[in-house]
Amino acid sequence: MSDKKFWVFLIFLFSGIIIGGLLGEVAAGVSWLSWLSYGNSFGLTQPFVLDLAILQLTFSIMIHLNVASIIGIIIAILIYRKI
């Protein structure tokens, strides 16, 4: 996979995650679509702090996945493969 194709794939993937996640949050308020918002969060709950006296860096990552974002990932991969 060339560099250009890799970056296009990442853009498609992140777009699918973001759009799916947003749709899942919107669907949480609709009773018959609330299953799209079912998901879980994982990551570092306590941030890692690196104190260098003159500079303090804080590292943390938290991933929120729901059913809609997983569907968005699958759709993004399918669209990428078609083009």
Image (spheres, helix red, strand yellow):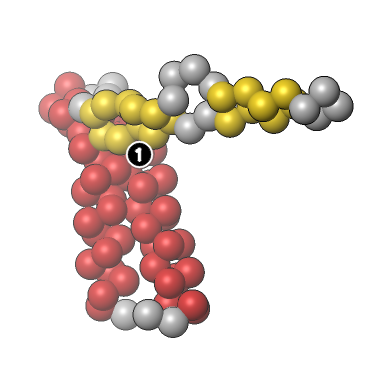
For the N terminus, the image quarter is: bottom left
| Residue 19 screen position, x and y as percent | 38, 47
Q: Residue furthest front?
A: 52
> Three-letter amino acid code at disc 1?
Gly
Which residue, as the protein is rendered here, is positioned at the far right? 54
Mark yes or no: residue 26 visible. Answer: no
Rendered residue at 39%/29% (across/down):
43
Within 10 angstroms of label 1, few (less than 14), some, or many (20 or more) residues? many
Residue displayed at 26% across by 75% down: 81
Q: Is residue 40 visible?
A: yes
Kindly indicate the quadrant of the structure image that contains residue 12.
Answer: bottom left
2 up-or-down from 26: above or below: below
Q: Is residue 53 left or right of residue 83?
A: right
Direction from residue 37 to residue 60 in the image, left or right? right
Q: Residue at x 30, y 61 (%)?
A: 76
Residue at (49% x, 17% y) in the render: 46
Q: Nearer the viewer, residue 54 or 16?
A: 54
Q: Which quadrant would residue 66 be assigned to in this image? A: top left
Can you identify the residue that label 1 sits on?
A: 21
Q: At numbered mark 1, what does the secondary structure look like: helix, strand or loop?
A: helix
